[in-house]
Amino acid sequence: MGIFGGGPSTGNGGNAAESARAAEEARQARITQGTADVNKTFEQFNPDFYSKRAADYSGYYAPQVDEQYANAHRDLVMNLARTGVLNGSEGARQLGLLDEQYGREKEGVASRASDFSNQARTSVEQNRSDVLNQLSGSADPAAAAASSTARATTLSAPGSFSPIGQLFAGLANQVGQGIAGATAGLNTSYPAIRSNPISGPGSMKLTY
């Protein structure tokens, strides 16, 4: 009790509590400001950014598929003409198989372009989350701003693509050998067309 019957004096304990509250409020204010700065830096990663990522992927690979198909179609027509079956049912069947394969390859490019875009989105969100977690622990908005800027620069860099492999390699020759074998009573089965891997940026491995 106090001298005149009052409550207990808070003394230094009260001052310490006030100081702790003030320090925590200041810390939360720094985190709030840092969070706003980080989110502003990452605003560039919007739907248009991810759409462009998919378009970049398709723009790189789709023309290569088209070119390889055109070359394979030309070679197949020449091969079928040499064997005398170009205008028959076998010729139509083989050209149809090539067209089916071409359709699958085009659909594959579109599907992987979407995967490529989604992977970019996942990477962006992971990096943003990492910076915010660091900010929550350090309450250092300057460090968070520097980290978010560096990460955003890396994430926004154009994708790095590897040339496509041979999608229709040897198809015309395989067909020719099959047809020649048929005339000699040999096995007329045709080897499967094998696809090749495409490497995307970073550690992404897209199987073609």
Image (cartoon, rainbow, N blue to C red):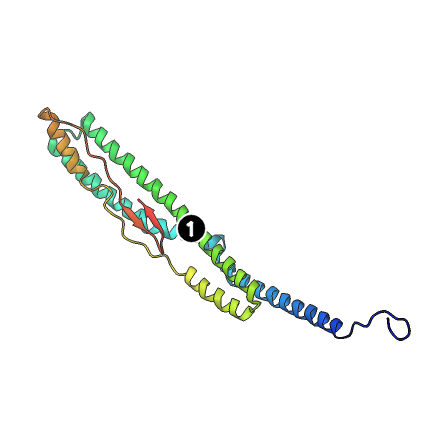
Which residue is disc 1 drawn over?
A: 119
Residue 123's x, y, as percent? 44, 55
The quadrant of the image that shows the N terminus is: bottom right
Q: Nearer the viewer, residue 28 or 160?
A: 28
Q: Nearer the viewer, residue 119 or 86?
A: 119
Is residue 84 among the parts visible in the rendering?
A: no
Say what secondary structure mark 1 lies in. helix
Residue 165's x, y, as percent? 25, 47
Which quadrant of the view contains residue 68? Answer: top left
Which quadrant of the view contains residue 73? Answer: top left
Is 132 positioned to the left or the right of 196 in the image?
A: right
Q: Nearer the viewer, residue 86 or 207?
A: 207
Number of numbered tags placed on the structure image: 1
Q: Nearer the viewer, residue 170 or 38?
A: 38
Residue sticking out furthest to the top: 185
Graded by Cα atoms within 10 Å as few (under 14), some (14 to 19) or many (20 or more), the crowding at tag 1 reads some
Q: Which three-letter amino acid code belongs to the residue tagged 1? A: Gln
The quadrant of the image that shows the C terminus is: top left
Residue 52's x, y, as percent? 42, 53
Is residue 28 among the parts visible in the rendering?
A: yes
Is 119 positioned to the left or the right of 71 in the image?
A: right
Q: Residue at x 38, y 47 (%)?
A: 113
